[in-house]
Image (cartoon, grey):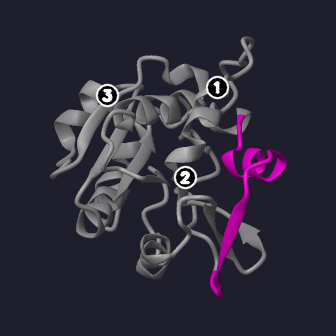
Amino acid sequence: MNAAVILAAGSSSRMGFPKQLAEVRDKPLLQAIIDKVNINFDNSSVVLGSENEIISEKIDFKNSNILINENWSEGITSSIRTALFFYQNQKEINNIIFFLGDQPEVEVEVIDGLNNDDHDGNKVLVPQYRYKLGFPILIPRMFWTKLELITEDDEIDEEKSVFQDFDLVDFLISSEIEIKKLNFNFLEPIDYDEEKDF
């Protein structure tokens, strides 16, 4: 079984309010991706961190679990570890599909492609949008231990976006993990803005 994880723990200090609550088509940004994920997955979680209490009050998480990443300032790797720890003992979960909390425009075709691909759990699945790789990314259980070992640099510039300190796609390409690219003939989901905080 696949589980979906929405990474939404980052801060948005430059915006003056949580980016997760920014309005997109009459609903909060995070709500839009939660709604899409809940339609397509029986098991899903949202990783929150910065200002999680404010966000929790304004978002309907539906059937998704709420996971709190207390170390969110370390960057996206800490959110990935939070999700992996949660699902580690849930043996029915074979794969986690990671979504970014600021990309609500993920095509259903991409979700279906990841959910229905016959990869036998031995390859990471990464969508290729024309010529660029991007999220959401499917990580089989056999690779979770490798991801759990990733840590951010100790010295993180607080003014720098925490997402920019680590790029999961780049890490997967440069590692010994075998990747299967799923090709889609359209552009990747667009971030809400250029501050990649998730």
Residue drawn at (77%, 49%), measured in percent from left and top? 170
Q: Which label number is shown at residue 139?
A: 2
Residue drawn at (64%, 78%), measured in percent from left and top? 187
x, y percentage for residue 27? 27, 59
- Assign a secondary structure to mark 1: loop
Residue drawn at (69%, 71%), measured in percent from left and top? 181
Is the residue 50 above or below the residue 24 in the image? above
The three-letter code of the residue at mark 2 reads: Ile
| Callout 3 crowding tier (Cα within 10 Å): few <14, some 14–19, many ≥20 | many
Question: Mark 3 sits on what residue?
Answer: 52
The three-letter code of the residue at mark 3 reads: Asn
Snapshot quadrant of residue 19? top left
Q: Is residue 178 magenta?
A: yes
Left or right of 197 in this view: 94: left
Snapshot quadrant of residue 165? top right
Q: Say which label, 1 or 2, has the lower sequence index.
A: 2
Question: Mark 1 sits on what residue?
Answer: 149
Is the residue 34 above or below the residue 190 in the image? above
Q: Which residues are magenta?
A: 166-186
Residue drawn at (42%, 71%), measured in percent from left and top? 115
Q: Which label number is shown at residue 179?
A: none
The three-letter code of the residue at mark 1 reads: Leu
